[in-house]
Amino acid sequence: MRAQHFKKWFAKLSALNLPQRLQTLAALHPAAGLDQVIALIGQIGGAMRRCPSCACERYYRHGQANGLQRYRCRACGRTYNDLSGTPLARLRLRDKWLDYLASVLDSTSVRAAAKEVGVHRNNAFRWRHRFLKGPQQDQPQRLGGIAEADEMFMLESQKGARKLDRPARRRGGRAGKRGISRELDCILVARDRSGQTVDAVVGRGALTAAQLERHLLPRLERQVLLVSDAHAAYRSFARKHGIAHEAVNLRAGVRVRPGLAGAIHVQNVNAYHQRFRQWLSRFRGVASRYLPNYLGWRRALDGGRITTAEQLLRIAIGVIHSER
């Protein structure tokens, strides 16, 4: 539209009645969402832009495609945009991304989100796990002060798999063995007193010191005080790496005891376990292969750390680019 035509059209906006204003806003909403998404992609991608093929940072602009600026690498000659090589590449309907991410913040089910945003339920499911790659990897670098660690167990699920490596069981079934067995996924959660949380699905069955070394050691500051239950794996892990460690004997009925640095307990991390289980129950069963995504989702929501769709999109794009 030419500038003079736009000025005439804009001058008439004040004469619109309420239904006409609402109709105009509804028509402009997708375009506004698309412009905002493209601006965020360019802003975040520009700070760490490099070729996804050879990692060269020398490039020049090479036209546009689907609303995104394209670039050509000066080293290998390949073209790319700010989403190339990421889980968000070739993800269409960008004008609906922010509306969909708002439903993610509300912990909406796949079908309800699809109906609310106006996409197919298969799209909504695929979008969920592409966007959650960012929150899954967005964990604090270090836990300091007093860090509580404890594991929780969930029945292994192969929901959605075409081939099972075990006999099928009814929805909501039980493990074939009592106690902790290889039929249970082990989820490790560590949380310091400031509310920073790290988590990981470490494997099946009982927790081991080797799993703690792989998943927890890189996240602990040298001067941290690790607090856990009386599981021998924590004691062995702390002794091997020279980490200050205090244990709470929950089986003996000890919940809290005084310490030099503060109260010794694992109530914060246990409360987090409970909140995660209650929140996860609304999805009526989650496949084990997607558990890391749901852990990241819950971590993003816990304590109101992320409150807007724009923040969630920034994490989805920014974390992905930082690992290129």
Image (tube, grey):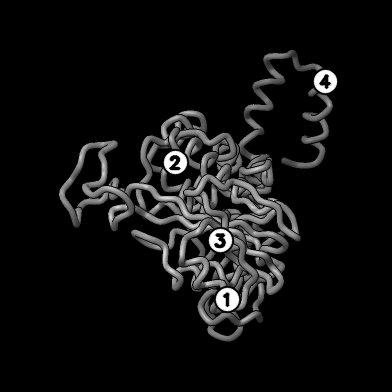
User: Where residue 224 sits: x, y (%)?
Assistant: 68, 67
Which of the numbered marks, if any, corresponds to residue 137?
A: 3
The earlier-in-sequence mark between 1 and 4 is 4
The N terminus, quarter of image:
top right
Q: Which residue is mark 4?
A: 14
Front of the two marks 2 and 1? 2
**Which amino acid does the dot numbered 4 rest on?**
Ser
Residue in view at x 50 percent, y 59 percent = 230
Residue in view at x 66 percent, y 51 percent = 257
Q: Are marks 1 and 4 in contact (CB under 8 Å)?
A: no
Residue 84 or residue 144, whichever sits in front: 144
Classed neighbour count for the residue bearing mark 4: other residues with Cα under 10 Å, few (<14), some (14–19), many (≥20):
few
User: Where residue 69 sits: x, y (%)?
Assistant: 63, 62
Classed neighbour count for the residue bearing mark 1: other residues with Cα under 10 Å, few (<14), some (14–19), many (≥20):
many
CA–CA distance in space, label 1 to label 3? 21 Å
Q: Which residue is mark 2?
A: 124
Q: Which residue is mark 1?
A: 51
**Which amino acid does the dot numbered 2 rest on?**
Ala
